[in-house]
Amino acid sequence: MRIDKAEVVVTSPDRNFVTLRLTTDEGHVGLGDATLNGRELAVVAYLKEHVVPLLLGRDPAAIEDTWQYLYRGAYWRRGPVTMAAIAAVDMALWDIKGKAAGMPVYQLLGGASRKGLLAYGHASGKTTDELFDSVRSHLEQGYRAIRIQTGVPGLKAIYGIASQGADAGDADVRYDHEPARRGALPMEEDWDTRAYLRHLPGVFEAVRNEFGPELPLLHDGHHRMTPIQAAKLGKELEPYDLFWLEDCTPAENQEALRLVRQHTTTPLAIGEIFNTVWDFKDIIREQLIDYVRGAVTHMGGITPLKKTLDYAAMYQIKSGMHGPTDISPVGMAAAMHLGLAIHNFGIQEYMQHGSRTNEVFQQSFTWADGMLHPGDEPGLGVTLDVDEAGKYPYAQAYLPYNRLHDGTMHDW
Ligand code: EZ4
Ligand code: CO
C-alpha cells in the first residue's frame, strides 16, 4: 500500500477546523485533526508546504517510522504547529490501518479496557443562579461529571463563561463557551486574581450544598495564578472534594507545581498546551500531577500520547485528555479510541460540537448516560463530507487575551 493523495481541508462550520485527508492506492481514506485554535493557517502551511510532499508514495502501514521521520527528520522539534501537523498524519495513518484491518482503532491499541468513557461537561454562569441552571441542564443531558466556571464580581468578561462570546444567542452553545471569536482582532478580557480567589471557594460551597457530595466537580484555573496563589486555592477548595484543579499556574514553569503540591491534596491536572512527553517528563516522575491533559491533536498523535500515558501509568497518573470544541470530531474520535484502550483512563472532556459541524463530520461515537464510546466502525469512525465542508470557508478567529486593571498583559 502507498499514500496516493494528501489533502488539507479547512472548514469553518461552527468554528475553524483543519483536517488532513490521506488516500491510499487501495482506496482507503484516513483522517487526521490538525486544528490549532487561532493559528490554524500556520499548520495548513506546515502540512501543505513541508509534509504532504514527504507523504506521497510512503507506506501508510509504517506509523512509528513515519512519526519518527517527521519528528526527527525536521531537525526543528516540538512546538504546537509542528506537533499538530505530525498529529494529523499519525491519526490518519491509524485510521487507515484500522480500515485496512477492518477493526476500530481501539482494537489495534490493545482492545477495550472498559465499557465506555466517563465524560465531563462545562457548566458556567456569570452568577451563581445562572451556574446552577447550567449544572441542571448538564445533568439533564446525562453528564455525570461537571466543570464549574463562574463570573467574578467586578470583572466584565472572563474565561470559561458561556453566553458572553460571539455566539451568545445560539441555543446550541448556550452553555458551552467557545472562546475563539470570529473577527479581525481578538477580544480583550479582564482579570484580577485576588478577586477570583476571594470569590471561588464560596461558589464551590454553594454548588456542593445544592447538588450534594457525589457529583464529580472540576475547575480550570487557566494558567492565571502564581504558585503560592494556586497553593492557597487548592487548599481552600479541599472541603469541596474536586475531581481536579486544572492549569493552576502557567504551563512553562513546571517547578511551580512542586510548591502547589506541598500545600494541597486537591488533585492537579495540566498539559492541554503541552506538545510532547518532554513537557510531562519531570512532573510525572516527581508525581506533581494527577491527570495528563494532553490532546491527541496537540501532542503529535495517538502514538506519542499513548507512550506518555503508559509512562504516567507507572506513577498512578491518569488521562484527562483535552476535548473542547476546538478539537475536531476526528481528534475527539482519536481521544476516545485511545481512552477506551489504555488502562489508566481518568476522564474525557466533552463539550459537544454544533449541528453544522456534525453534518460536515459524520461520526460513529455514542453518548449515553454520561459515557462516550467511539463505536465499532473500522478506523476512527469519522467521515468527512468534503462538499459540506466546502460550504464553510475559513473565517479569521482569535482566542481572547487578558489585561489586568492597570493595563498589564496577563496569562489568558
Ligand atoms: O481554552 O480549548 O480546558 N479547556 C480549555 C479550553 C481552551 C481552549 C483553547 O483553544 O482550557 O477551553
Ligand atoms: Co483547560
Image (spheres, helix red, strand yellow):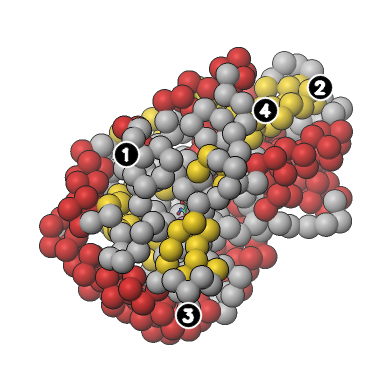
Residue beneath disc 1: 174
Would the CB of label 1 be found within 8 Å of ligand 1? no
Front position in the image: 139 or 306: 139
Please say if the residues under marks 3 and 2 sit with CB atoms less than 8 Å apart.
no
Regarding mark 1 in the picture, which secondary structure is present there?
Answer: loop
Instruction: Mark yes or no: residue 23 visible.
Output: yes
Which disc, if any, is residue 402?
A: none
Front position in the image: 302 or 11: 11
Regarding mark 4 in the picture, which secondary structure is present there?
Answer: strand
Which disc, if any, is residue 4?
A: 2
**Counting other residues with Cα less than 10 Å from the Cα at mark 1, is it few (<14), some (14-19), or many (20 or more)?**
some
What amino acid does circle 1 point to?
Answer: Arg
> How many circles with numbers are drawn on the protein?
4
Please say if the residues under marks 2 and 1 sit with CB atoms less than 8 Å apart.
no
Front position in the image: 98 or 129: 129
Residue beneath disc 4: 9
Instruction: Name the front one of labels 3 and 1.
Output: 1
User: In the visual, does 40 lie left or right of 149?
Assistant: right
Which quadrant would residue 165 be assigned to in this image?
A: top left
What amino acid does circle 4 point to?
Answer: Val
Cα gap from disc 4 to disc 3, whole angstroms: 41 Å
Cα gap from disc 2 to disc 4, whole angstroms: 16 Å
Residue beneath disc 3: 227
Q: In the rendering, at what x and y percent does residue 254 appear?
A: 58, 74
Q: Is residue 103 above or below residue 276?
A: above
User: In the visual, does 376 lie left or right of 49?
Assistant: left
- Quadrant, the N terminus: top right
